Image: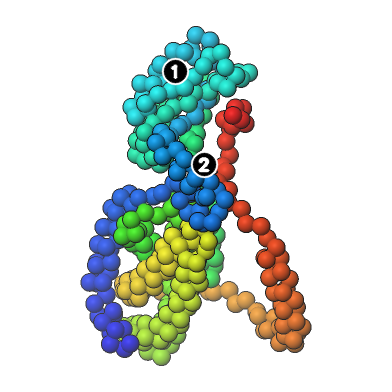
Amino acid sequence: MKRIADFIVEKRVFLIVAVLIITVISGVLIPKVNVNTDMTKYLPDNSSMKIGMDKMDEAFPDAETDNTIRVMYTDLDEGQKLILKDILEKIPNVTDVDYDDESEDYNRDKYTKYVLHMEYDYGSPEELAIFDTLDRDYSFNEMTYMDDSGNSPGLPLWVMIFAVCLLMIILIIMSGSWFEPLLFLFTIASAVVINLGSNLILGTISENTFSVTAILQLVLSMDYSIILINRYRQELENTDDRKAAMKAAVAGAFSSISSSSITTVVGLLALVFMSFKIGFDMGVVLAKGVFCSVVCVFLILPGLILTFSKVIEKTAKPVPDVPTGGLSRLCGKIAPVLCVVFVFLFAGAYYMQTRTVIGFSMLSPDKIADVFPN
């Protein structure tokens, strides 16, 4: 490992540039990754929903498979309703529009519903183009729309923002420098981009996997950066040579980081054996993400730390010393009791797990269905 550590430190500029080039290429590839929005493809083969869908396909092999988008307006005049139907039919990629001015299936109280047909997949560029046209040219009278893909909503943006902010607060408080968190984020962000771009080799990933990968990879991998820089500080106490300290830190931290990452990767790969097939998709992508993070931590973080070592020293700050001695002594005293408690908790949790009924739902909030349940 010493030779590898020497190479990483001596060739740090080359490695940083190489990883940055790979990151840029991966960023360009991200939009080219095929994201599957049809969650029914991940249903277990023995699920009643999957069996029913297969039987329908066998019974009606020639059935039309066009997809639909429901559009609802509020407070339209009677004269506007039929005119708007004709206008919506002219939207590019829309093949037909369903509307009956005498039916309650399309007219209820102050609301009016139109059903747009298309021959393209849900989530395809053509469908997104229809959405853009609706938002740009037809977003009057409290217009709302929803396709009939039946997909569950992805991870809300506010959740990701909150998670990143919380992580930054913890890093800023516990880091030995105000500048360190930026290096950590840059390193893991590069790994996230590489992971997302390399999903192209998988062919297709699920929408859920795509939406949660970045934040989960960030949280799962951040401790590797902390382990490395803490080891670097320990080595600096023995020598004033930063490069020698970093070489020793890389070699010394390898066992800790590799063992921690292997445990995480194995745990994520356990998702592959889920009956709900999205587990395979998510397990492989997240495990690959952790691997990318470990590689980036070893290849570019040492170089970044050495490059910005003076900035780190100038922005140094005290680290809060959290007293844990009392808690450690307490845990030692009540260890036998805790063991018994956890045995009962495990037994109870296992029993409840065997009694849990598993269901598969792809419901998402649907304002149109609240007005037009049919």
Of residues 224 and 36, which is closer to you in this image? 36
Q: Secondary structure at mark 2?
A: loop
* Residue 214 x, y percent position in the rendering: 44, 58
The label on residue 85 is 1
Separation of marks 2 and 1 at Cα, in angstroms? 24 Å
* Residue 54 x, y percent position in the rendering: 48, 47
User: For the view shown, which residue lies furthest in the bottom direction?
Assistant: 238
Q: Is residue 226 visible?
A: no
* Residue 162 x, y percent position in the rendering: 54, 54
Say whether disc 2 or disc 1 marks the residue closer to the N-terminus. 1
Q: Are marks 2 and 1 in contact (CB under 8 Å)?
A: no
> Where, quadrant-wise, is the N terminus in this rendering?
bottom left
Say above or below: 23 vs 373: below
Please indicate whether residue 184 sits to the left or right of residue 46 in the image. left
> Quadrant of residue 197 in the image?
bottom left
User: For the view shown, which residue lies furthest in the front direction?
Assistant: 59
Q: Residue at x 46, y 31 (%)?
A: 69
Q: Which residue is mark 2?
A: 150
Please indicate whether residue 112 sits to the left or right of residue 289 in the image. right
Categorize mark 1 by other alpha carbons within 10 Å: few (<14), some (14-19), many (20+). Answer: some
Categorize mark 2 by other alpha carbons within 10 Å: few (<14), some (14-19), many (20+). Answer: some
